[in-house]
Amino acid sequence: MLMTTTSTLEGKQIVTYYGIASGETIIGANVFKDFFASIRDIVGGRSGSYEKVLREAKEIALREMCDQAERMGANAVIGVDLDYETVGESGSMLMVTAAGTAVRYQ
């Protein structure tokens, strides 16, 4: 499945627009990641554990978006947008949403 943030496909002709396809995921970070991230916040540096969770959530949301587009009959998703939010009582849950326009191109 081809994915792009642009609204066109260079050198390809879009023959059908199916509508919006989206994928969502909510992933929680555990207490140990929170603890070590707070230490990183004090001493500086990157939080590898949070970065890993963020990448995983993004990949799941994109995969779900592509799966939905495929079920619609699409072979590409254009105009892809990713949104990130923290949710939950203490903001310890990460929500990632991927959305774009499902299309068929030749």
Image: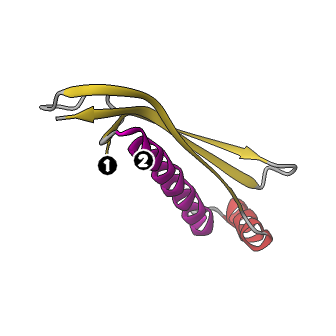
Give x and y (percent) for residue 78. 35, 33
Q: Which residues are magenta?
A: 47-73
Query: Which residue appears at 76% of the width and 46% of the height?
Result: 87
Give x and y (percent) for residue 81. 47, 35
Report the colour scheme: secondary structure
User: Does the image show residue 4?
Assistant: no
Choose between 83 and 78: the one closer to the eye.
Answer: 78
Q: Height in image: 29 above or below 72?
A: below
Choose between 24 and 29: the one closer to the eye.
Answer: 24
Choose between 25 and 19: the one closer to the eye.
Answer: 19
Query: Which residue appears at 22% of the width and 34% of the height?
Result: 105
Q: State the separation of the CA atoms marked 2 and 1.
A: 7 Å
Q: Height in image: 7 above or below 69?
A: above
Q: How many residues crowd around disc 1 within 10 Å: few (fewer than 14), some, or many (20 or more)?
A: few
Q: Height in image: 104 above or below 67?
A: above
Residue 36: quarter of image: bottom right
Query: Which residue appears at 34% of the width and 39% of the height?
Result: 74
Q: Please, what secondary structure does the residue beneath circle 1 have?
A: loop
Residue 7: quarter of image: top left
Give x and y (percent) for residue 53. 60, 63
Work out which residue is located at the far left of the displayed protein and give it.
11
Q: Which residue is mark 2?
A: 66
* Residue type at numbered disc 1: Met
Q: Please, what secondary structure does the residue beneath circle 2 have?
A: helix
Total numbered labels placed on residues in the image? 2
Residues under numbered marks 2 and 1 in contact, where contact means CB atoms less than 8 Å apart: yes
Q: Does the magenta-highlighted stretch encompass residue 54?
A: yes
* Residue type at numbered disc 2: Cys
For marks 2 and 1, the one nearer the N-term is 1
Q: Which mark is residue 1?
A: 1
Q: Which mark is residue 70?
A: none
